[in-house]
Image: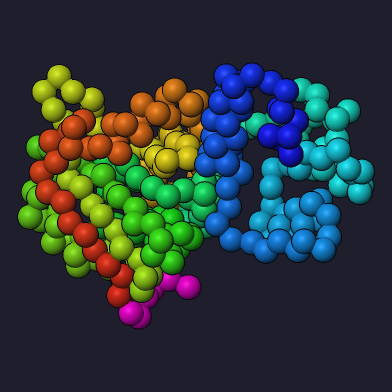
Amino acid sequence: MVWEALAGDDQNVRLRIGVLIGYLHERASGRRVGTWDGAVSWLSNVLVEHAREPFHAIVTTAQKEGAPYVLCDDDLETTNKYWQVIRTRPVRRTAAGYAAAFRGLIGAARRVVIVEPVFDPQERRFTLALEAIASLDPIASGQVTPCLIVRMDERTPTADELERRCRLYLPRHLGPNTSLDILFAEQKSGGERLHNRFIVTDVASVLLGDSIDEGRPGETNDIALLDEEHHRGRLAAYGNADQAFNVVRRLRLTGVVPWSGS
């Protein structure tokens, strides 16, 4: 339908629109699962998918059907909360809180990098948070192998000791179909400091205000969605850690049966 509407436009316009369509599909609207019933309307199909896994909002020229999250032309105002995109928010500092916050991001991703510089496999507060993230598809189904980046310096255990802890404690927190790559990385002289916490994906990236671990009851962690240019920079750095840091050691772990997760 888009190409038909552009039939009279010049080639440059069509090329720009083609890039935009690809961007929207890869970064904003692609979903891995779902069914489509050709016998009913587009909106009916979308409402079924919304019931399975909610969208933030649905934009359509059809009638609203009484749902506030279904937006028509007159609803596309900056004052409408469903037309606004919230870029920062607090999340409960629990495994379940992280899983709920990251489900949509990881569900659309083909690449996931978890940057947690002070991760300690002996600490249950870290392993529970990692287990919650690893329980999300497409990680849990084995379609995506996440990468965990951990800092190495004079204040951390040696690479041998950290590897021992990872191999001893982490497989029980991974599903039977799940693999995890771990990089132990040092800051390069004159290079980027390995300090901030991120979830970096090919779709988007979020920055966390504190460690990706469980806290005390009532505590929250702030997460912020990076803008596009910032995201691309972090993906280039953490997605190519060998160039940004000195990678001291790397290993891959796989889940075991029985798995401790539910």
Taking the spot 30% from the left edge, 39% from the top edge, the residue there is: 239
> Where in the figure is residue 227, as x and y percent of width and height?
50, 25
Tell me if residue 214 is in the magenta stretch.
no
Residues in magenta, as a range: 257-262
Which residue is nearer to you in this view: 151 or 147?
147
Which residue is nearer to you in this view: 241 or 210?
241
Q: Quadrant of residue 63?
A: top right
Taking the spot 20% from the left edge, 47% from the top edge, the residue there is: 183
Vertical order, 136 against 82 (above or below):
below
Tell me if residue 261 is in the magenta stretch.
yes
Q: How is the image coloured?
A: rainbow
> Where in the figure is residue 75, as x and y percent of width and height?
85, 30
Which residue is nearer to you in this view: 176 or 159?
176
Taking the spot 17% from the left edge, 45% from the top edge, the residue there is: 184
Q: Quadrant of residue 129?
A: bottom left
Please say whether residue 73 is visible from this viewpoint: yes
Q: Main secondary structure of the magenta part?
A: loop
> Where in the figure is residue 204, as x and y percent of width and height?
47, 37
Which image quarter holds the N terminus? top right
> Where in the figure is residue 98, as x and y percent of width and height?
49, 51
Q: Quadrant of residue 14?
A: top right
